[in-house]
Amino acid sequence: MQSPVKSLSNSNKIPSHPPSVSGGSSMLEQEGGESIRVCIRIRPLNQRESSTGNSSCIDVQNPKNLLLKMKGGMRNYTFHHIFDVDAQQGEVFSETGVHSLLDSALEGYSCTAFAYGQTGSGKTYSMAGVEERFGRQDYTSDETDGIIPRAISYVWQRMASRQERYFVKSGFFEIYNEQVRDLLNPSSGVLHCRWNAKQGFFVEELMIVDCTNIDDLIAVLHEGMKNRKSGSHELNADSSRSHSILMIYFISEITSEDGHSFKRYGKMYFVDLAGSERLKETKSQGDMLNETKNINKSLFTLGKVISALGDKKNRGLKPHVPYRDSKLTMVLMDSLGGSSRAIMIACVSPANAYIEETTSTLNYATRAMNIQNKPLLQVDNSEYLILNLRREAQLLKLENEYLKEQLARAQGGLPPMMVDFANSYNESPNDPVLQEFHFEINKLREENAKLRETKEEAEKSYHQSMIDNQSMHIKLENLEYSFVGSTKTSENPSSGVSQEYTISTLLNENANLKKRMNALQEEQIQMQFKLGEATPAVPPQEEIQQLREYNEQMMKRVEALQARERELLDHLMKAQRGRTPKPK
Ligand SMILES: Nc1ncnc2c1ncn2[C@@H]1O[C@H](COP(=O)(O)OP(=O)(O)OP(=O)(O)O)[C@@H](O)[C@H]1O
């Protein structure tokens, strides 16, 4: 496909750093969704309006607030951005945030920019530029170019600066009198709108062309604009009588260092809606009257959809949204309350004669600000696989860090919480990126197994300390028992009195030891209780060390007691034989 358009003039050069979409009022909502960014554009009063004595009924306070001068007083409106009458096309392109949408489309998201407003309010001018220029063979780009030609130029520059390889495809259709028509292949007649789980609503048998360069895409725009249904009426000599939808698909192929590639499917829709108009104002008759009725019907359905989605009462609920009531709302389903990122440009005339239409547009736009979308990345299956593996690797890394941290704190405890990764992924695909993930996961698994082993050893050593304590306790019990026996023996009047002091000292010593052993046992029970809990409680190294030292101390005391016992028994025996050496 050839086009006379080569590139945008220097005066229209797009800034290299696109402005943030969020600006002051964030596009991202706390609830996890993303609201539609709504901008208002006020066009200048036209000649007809000025000559009939109209004045402006809109007072722009600042880029976010405007006052509407109504009969009963002023009404304040707030939007994400307001373009006053003197706003230039380049400014509209940058401040609407279309840049950001295009960048998202290149990342694999679905995005939509749509223009809404009364007939003659500047929708086509904002979206495409001066309509009549598009049919001309000598068309060259200039500053009247609207959002779409600028977007094409911008996105082509962006693609050139990115590493990924992109395949660009495009289609252009219109909805006229509730019938879908292919703007690139008008002879194909009426097309059907179908639905499937993967794509949602889509136009069946629509011509989709490959665009290998910027000119191909510009040519799609020109061809479609030329074929679009238009008519002349009281309010607009070149009025679009249909809703037009230009679709641009960006299929990106990302190639990793090892040569593996996977795909992302991003798309950008530009929707130029037919005007919302009052029949009496347009003075439509015949076919045009029917068109106007149909336009209003589909816009009425769009209004119902916006109301259902934007009504704060419906937040968190699943209200009935009448998407299926019109072709327009069917094809916009994904853009409204779906998985797209979206921008609405609501165009208004400042003329006080149209204050009713302007009020209606501003109210419509206000409701649209409440719509929450949940943008989703469109990727192919292998990408999902990689994302899952990445997640798995991340979990293993976390486990690994946890184990290391626990080991650093202590040389004991229970095995950590286990995640059953073994069954979570059964495929062993051949491609290198996936293999690399498997390799990394296996490495982490091995490392984790080793860490667990070390922990188990530390745990065993801890348990051994416990067992030593217990056996020490038993020894002490036995020793105490033997002393109690000795005491009984010492009560024998023939045994003498000098040993009384030694026996009571030993008994005191034993009682103290027993107390300490009970305390130790108590500690041990608590430790066992801790170990039995779901959350692994690892006894700190310090604690184990203390237990060991305590064991050693007790061992010494037991040995001392045993020596004392031997000495005492010896003393008692000698005393019985009539020789009574003094105890030490
Ligand atoms: N901001 C603007 N600055 C200068 N001219 C404008 C501006 N907006 C619109 N116009 C002019 O006003 C006329 C009507 O605009 P346009 O065709 O874009 O309206 P529309 O909303 O698309 O109408 P319809 O719904 O009937 O197609 C055109 O001649 C257009 O060039």
Image (cartoon, helix red, strand yellow):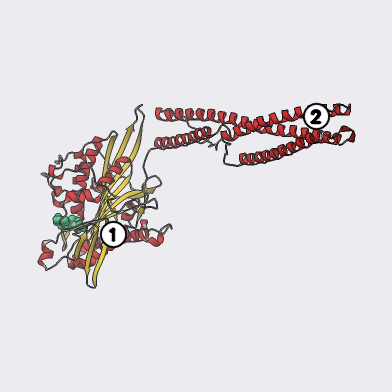
Q: Residue 80 vs residue 462: left or right?
A: left
Q: What element carries label 1?
A: helix
Viewer-nearest of discs 1 and 2: 2
Residue found 21% across the figure and 67% down from its top = 355
Three-letter residue code for mark 1: Ala
Q: Residue 502 vs residue 99: left or right?
A: right
Distance from disc 1 to disc 2, alpha carbons, whole Å, reads: 108 Å
Q: Is the CB–ligand 1 distance for label 1 below 8 Å? A: no
When the figure is inspected, residue 223 is found, relative to residue 40, above or below; the finding is above
User: Label 2: which residue?
Assistant: 582
Three-letter residue code for mark 2: Lys
Q: Residue 365 carries which label?
A: 1
Residue found 27% across the figure and 58% down from its top = 79
The residue nearer to you, when weighing 447 against 112, is: 447
Residue found 80% across the figure and 34% down from its top = 483
Q: Residue 503 vs residue 61: left or right?
A: right
Looking at the picture, how far across and down is residue 122, in whole percent? 19, 56
The residue nearer to you, when weighing 296 against 515, is: 515
Looking at the picture, how far across and down is residue 225, in whole percent? 19, 49
